[in-house]
Image (spheres, rainbow, N blue to C red):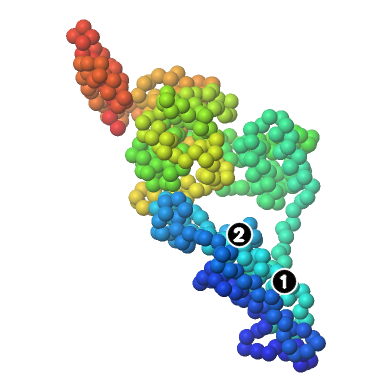
């Protein structure tokens, strides 16, 4: 072999690139040496020096940016915007999942400095030199060619056009996102979207799907087929309607107290109003009237708008909440991300409290709980219909089946002799039942919980 290509230090390969991990790039970066074929000398790349004035000021590593605690632990990895893998942490106090500022700055440095040098060595070096050049896979990710999955480009184009058509037809963005997930999901299951019989067979073979889920998928593909003129006989899956899970109020309070403050605020609003998750997520600060202590719900899914009186607890939390944008809930990218974060924190709380029933509580479960509790208090189905914003009373009649008369725990009774006493009882949730002594004395009651 030509002596020109023998490295000067066999024990330490010349092309190895190492990344500083213990300090924030305090002095100099690691050099990458390229060998020239003209002589036995080596040429060292220009070293990048970061002066003290150029060092960014960062917070202590592993500190939660929300609550400030250092009680965090490793929680997987993520690919940063520089295509470098960084460590993710989960706060054991508030449940916030984050990446440390140190890791993000280090990823940026690797992408801008080390990665370019490593790629240049791999491209310019001779085959014999490549034997001594090693790039750390732990620090520089995805340099090897990736095997792309085989997809049908035509179907992707049709799906994109179909989603655009739905948008022009006035479908809600949440509906479009669900249909997008369904159609791409069918494609991942190797269903040919241009062949209705293939789609029908794919849906039928999903034995782990419930009939209700299959029904939703059939409706989504039916609209897709109608747009492109595919003829098919739509299969019928009869969804068995089950009674929803209704938790105890203390279980809901346990979740609200244990989750992150933004998710806890969303759950508290859902508990007091019975609004849908999308209606709460889209709330604006202009929907809150702190003087009148009211909260306005802008309806979705064709329901009616509503207005509710806030409790003192909810009002105090909203007044102390940070107002950074016009939207109240702006920490998560979308509602789906918020749901996933809630599910992770719910699992942790259920394990901590040894109560597996908490894992059955979804955000929409609080809507069912609100309708049930309101009907249990008032026995007025029209009041429940107005509270939930239903336009069809058939949807509201479900809540009459969820109230068990045999589990009636009775009432707490209070007597009010002055208007001031009556005002205090009404604020505490009591309702007037009867009066005597020519209206001088009034009796109030509230159901036991």
Number of marks in the rendered image: 2
Task: Specify the label residue 119 is tagged with.
Answer: 1
Q: Which mark is residue 308?
A: none
> Between residues 116 and 436, which one lies in front from this camera angle?
116
Q: What is the C-alpha distance between the residues marked 1 and 2? A: 19 Å
Q: Residue furthest right?
A: 38
Do the numbered discs 1 and 2 sit on residues whose CB atoms are within 8 Å? no
Q: Residues within 10 Å of mark 1 (few under 14, many from 20)?
A: few
The C terminus, quarter of image? top left
Q: Which residue is mark 2?
A: 79
Residue 315: image quadrant is top left
* Residue 211, position as x, y percentages in the image: 57, 39
Q: Is residue 150 left or right of residue 263?
A: right
Viewer-side label of 1, 2: 1
Q: Position of residue 249 (x, y in %)?
A: 35, 36
Residue most toward the top?
Answer: 438
Relative to 26, is 373 on the left or the right? left
Establish if 279 lies above or below 425: below
- Give the x, y percent position of residue 50: 60, 69
Quick one: SS at disc 2? strand
Q: Helix, strand or loop at disc 1?
A: helix
The answer to whether 324 is drawn above or below residue 24 in the figure is above
The residue at the point 66 percent across, 68 percent down is 113
Q: Earlier in the sequence, mark 1 or mark 2?
A: 2
Q: Split into 4 quadrants, where in the image is the N terminus?
A: bottom right
Where is residue 332 shown, x and y percent of the image?
54, 45
Q: Would you call the spot at circle 2 few (<14 residues within 10 Å), some (14-19), or many (20 or more)?
A: few
Residue 210 visible, this orientation = no
Q: Residue at x 47, y 46 (%)?
A: 342
Which residue is at the far front? Answer: 53
| Left or right: residue 85 compared with residue 404 | right
């Amino acid at each position: 072999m030509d002596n020109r290509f023998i490295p000067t230090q066999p024990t330490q390969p010349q092309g190895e690139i190492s990344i500083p991990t213990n300090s924030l790039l305090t002095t100099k970066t690691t050099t990458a040496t390229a060998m020239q074929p003209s002589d036995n000398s080596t040429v060292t790349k220009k070293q990048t020096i970061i002066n003290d004035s150029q060092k960014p000021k960062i917070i202590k590593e592993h500190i939660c940016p929300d609550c400030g605690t250092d009680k965090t632990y490793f929680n997987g990895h993520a690919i940063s915007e520089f295509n470098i893998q960084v460590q993710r942490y989960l706060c054991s106090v508030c449940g916030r999942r984050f990446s440390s500022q140190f890791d993000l700055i280090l990823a940026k440095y690797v992408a801008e400095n080390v990665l370019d040098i490593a790629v240049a060595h791999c491209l310019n070096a001779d085959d014999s030199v490549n034997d001594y050049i090693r790039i750390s896979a732990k620090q520089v990710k995805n340099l090897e060619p990736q095997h792309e999955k085989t997809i049908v480009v035509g179907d992707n184009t049709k799906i994109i056009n179909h989603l655009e058509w739905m948008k022009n037809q006035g479908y809600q963005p949440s509906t479009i996102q669900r249909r997008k997930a369904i159609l791409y999901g069918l494609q991942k299951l190797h269903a040919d979207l241009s062949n209705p019989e293939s789609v029908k067979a794919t849906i039928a073979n999903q034995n782990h799907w419930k009939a209700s889920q299959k029904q939703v998928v059939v409706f989504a593909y039916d609209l897709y087929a109608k747009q492109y003129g595919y003829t098919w006989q739509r299969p019928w899956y009869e969804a068995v309607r089950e009674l929803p899970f209704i938790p105890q109020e203390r279980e809901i309070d346990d979740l609200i107290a244990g989750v992150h403050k933004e998710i806890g605020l969303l759950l508290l609003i859902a508990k007091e109003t019975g609004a849908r998750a999308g209606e709460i997520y889209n709330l604006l600060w202009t929907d809150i009237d702190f003087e009148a202590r009211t909260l306005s719900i802008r309806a979705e899914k064709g329901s009616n708008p509503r207005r509710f009186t806030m409790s003192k607890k909810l009002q105090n939390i909203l007044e102390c909440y940070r107002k950074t944008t016009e939207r109240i809930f702006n920490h998560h990218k979308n509602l789906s991300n918020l749901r996933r974060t809630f599910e992770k924190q719910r699992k942790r709380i259920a394990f901590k409290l040894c109560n597996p029933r908490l894992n059955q509580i979804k955000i929409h479960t609080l809507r069912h709980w609100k309708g049930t509790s309101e009907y249990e208090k008032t026995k007025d189905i029209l009041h429940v219909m107005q509270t939930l914003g239903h336009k069809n009373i058939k949807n509201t009649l479900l809540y009459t089946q969820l109230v068990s008369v045999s589990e009636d725990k009775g009432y707490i009774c209070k007597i009010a002799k002055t208007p001031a006493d009556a005002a205090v009882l009404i604020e505490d949730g009591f309702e007037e039942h009867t009066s005597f002594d020519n209206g001088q004395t009034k009796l109030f009651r509230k159901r036991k919980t």
